Amino acid sequence: MRNPAKDLKTLNIDKIIPDSKLFPVCVPSYQRPDAPILYELKKDPRIPVILFVRKTEKEKYAKWKKYFKIVYLSGVSNIGETRRAIVKYLYKNGVSGCFMMDDDIPKFGYLVKGYTKTGNKKLMLKNYPSEVCQISRDALKLWQYYISLCKDVALSGVVYRPFSWMWENTKKPWMYNDGVIAQIFFVNVELLTKSGINYRSNTECFNEDTCIQFEVMKAGLNTIHFKEFTYSVPVVGQIGGCSEMYGIDPNASKQENFERCIKSYTAGAHLLIDNIAKGHPGIVLKYERSGRGYAGFVWKYWRRPFDSVQKSENSRIYTK
């Protein structure tokens, strides 16, 4: 694990990744024209942003025209199909990579060493004044730089768990294919497309992120978690976004919606394992204590050591 704060002091990150070369932040949005992330990104015009919305909601999002490029999609009915359309659009328009951020993520940045109120050591999200964009441009540039040090990374994300914020993690080396990317932030558009891989509709696999991670690793490509970064946790159950996929009912109780989610996730896990990954030794059906079934990776099958010397064309693509 690297030290982002130290890297920002020792690296001239704006020279390595000038604003003109920063990958765009692509925001797929549905039924959330007032999503907090849009108000945050509005604060920093140096971050390139592309907002993707359904054509049927064109008027709802009209107020963002003067701040962001808006792409209107047709023929999409779920988030998997939307992400697929985004990758196709970017490749067609010569964009080799992007940061894909859902519309319910209001904060993203890098971790710094700090202490809890009780005095325990903990890695914490770097704080910025409220008037400053909470989607850190420095963190985005560092992420793009870190990707340039990797080999054949098609997808990248962060590990969002309390134990990921322990100081001890600063001593751990990077590893390829070493954890579920529950929230895929970086998408290597060029590598995915040239490998014939893209997101699938949720009707095919339910969880589009888990599915594409499986297909990427199956193809011999790499994924990587960066514990150097974090984001605020989206709340499952908000109206819009993916709530329809999970069976969320705005008129139902929290317990009822919780049970709906468990059933949806379990059925979705069967969909992925039985249809997409049937018989593959690297993925199995697992259950949580709540009874929720999910597609679990067998990491000893996938895990690869990180070798900073084995760089591919990533460094050329991402830092020049």
Image (cartoon, helix red, strand yellow):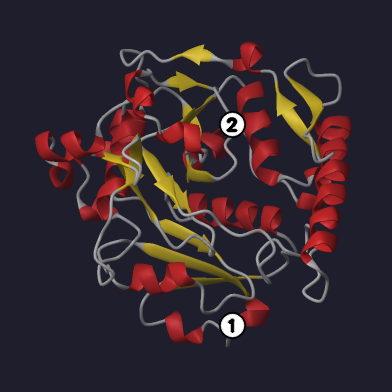
Q: Nearer the viewer, residue 283 or 123?
A: 123
Name the residue: 48% across, 73% down.
70
Of labels 1 and 2, the one closer to you: 1
Q: Quadrant of residue 306?
A: top left
Residue that label 1 marks: 58
Compare marks 1 and 2 and give the one earlier in the sequence.
Answer: 1
Q: State how far apart marks 1 and 2 are (Cα).
A: 33 Å
Q: Badge 1: few (under 14), some or many (20 or more) residues near its Cα, within 10 Å?
A: some
Name the residue: 53% across, 53% down.
233
Residue that label 2 marks: 195
Name which residue type carries label 2: Ser
Q: Quadrant of residue 133?
A: bottom left
Name the residue: 63% across, 71% down.
30
Q: Is residue 22 above or below residue 182?
A: below
- In the rendered image, which quarter contains the N terminus? top left
Residue 118 in view, yes or no: yes
* SS label for mark 1: loop
Residue at the front extreme, as displayed: 118
